[in-house]
Amino acid sequence: MPLLTRMVGTPLTIDIGPGAVAGLGPLLADRRISSGGHVAVIVGPGLGEEIAATCRPQLANAEIWNVEGGSVQAGAELAARLRQGFYDAVVGIGGGRTLDVAKYAASLSGLPLVAVATSLAHDGIASPVASLEDDAGRKTSVGVQMPIAVVVDLDYVRRSEPAMRRSGIGDAISNLSAIADWRLAERERGEAVDGVAVTFARVAATSIVHREDGIADDGFLIALAEALVLSGLAMATAGSSRPCSGGDHEILHAIDHLFPGTANHGELAGAASLFTSFLRGDDGLTAGIDACLTRHELPRTPADLGLTDEQFAQAVVQAPDTRPDRFTILEHLALDAAAVRERVDAFGAAYGR
């Protein structure tokens, strides 16, 4: 009989809600990840240590390690430590940088990872990608194993900075621009588009973009967490970040390289997706993204990000170099520096406050 369906990898379990951390020990046992709690718990600065202390009674056999930063070297050093012991799994607790280091180290050492997210700043919670700094301090994306389990405790998410919760909104809705870029590559270059991955990515974005509630509401935070997890599944299904990363993320990475520390990932993704939608001339999509960014008080223009128009234009010119194999609206238009500046000025005139 012919195989008429395909297998799509997902975490064994996804637990999102208040008090979710309290169930970490039973989750490890019930899902046969670690019946005896012999795990390496990786925590970062901030809430990670507090959560680890909370989990200590149910994870008496665990070893708890602290990590700082989010570099390839930190992940490699952590993997070396993991290989010196005997662990059933790695439990990463913290924000994006901590989870990315834990994901990378777990993949290098061949161990499953349980991701315990304390913020909803971007879609790396369940993705098969780790965003790390190389030796030169530049951001690089590394393929890793998808987490075997994902836990998002809304009690801790609520304690994260409001800007970090808003950031996840920008990253989620940027999927819409990324999908438009992927479809453009299909029309112009015959690139194959994975419809299942597109479905995951689009549902993630549309579940957020028109909601009227916000980051103070449990219903919204649950929807945002689910959207970010779905985005990770979209990338795992596609085998790349393509369904969630288009010209917007090319601009984001260029800004990170040229003007490090400008804004956080999701803020850059949201503003850049508004610009790339403007370039595409998609009035409906641009209006929807603009309304969502405005509603949640996210940056929309270069000035909102703390950049001049000239700096933003410089990033747009360099953006295609960050993903040489990717075809987006930026590569399609192939604008020179003068034409880019003209479009950036027009964008500012249309959307500047």
Image: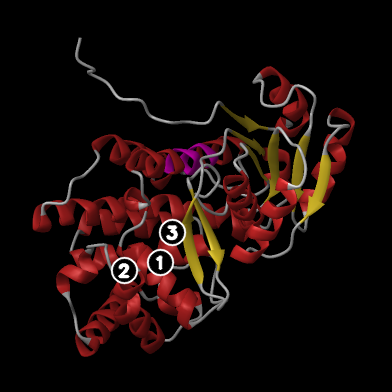
Query: Element at badge 1?
Result: helix
Tell me if mark 1 has few (under 14), some (14-19) or many (20+) residues whose alpha carbon lies within 10 angstroms of its own.
many
Q: Earlier in the sequence, mark 3 or mark 1?
A: 1
Quarter of the rendering occupied by the N terminus: top left
The residue that appears at 23% across and 80% down in the rendered structure is 343
Query: Element at badge 2?
Result: helix
Q: Which residue is mark 1?
A: 271
Tell me if mark 3 has few (under 14), some (14-19) or many (20+) residues whose alpha carbon lies within 10 angstroms of its own.
many
| 13 in relation to 282, above or below | above
Query: Element at badge 3?
Result: helix
Q: In the rendering, at what x and y percent does residue 149 appear?
A: 60, 32
Taking the view exactly as shown, the residue that stands out farthest to the front is 84
Q: Is there CB contact under 8 Å for labels 3 and 1?
A: yes
The residue that appears at 71% across and 32% down in the rendered structure is 88
Classify residue 261 by image quadrant. bottom right
Closer mark to the observer between disc 2 and disc 3: 2
Magenta highlight on residue 228: yes
C-alpha gap between disc 2 and disc 1:
6 Å
Q: Which residue is mark 3?
A: 293
> Magenta part of the protein: which range?
225-231
Q: In the rendering, at what x and y percent does residue 202 appear?
A: 33, 42
Q: Earlier in the sequence, mark 2 or mark 3?
A: 2
On the question of residue 43 being in view, the answer is yes
| 129 in relation to 113, above or below | below
Look at label 3 and name its amino acid: Leu
| 161 in relation to 234, above or below | below
Look at label 2 and name its amino acid: Phe
Q: Is there CB contact under 8 Å for labels 2 and 1?
A: yes
| 87 in relation to 138, above or below | above
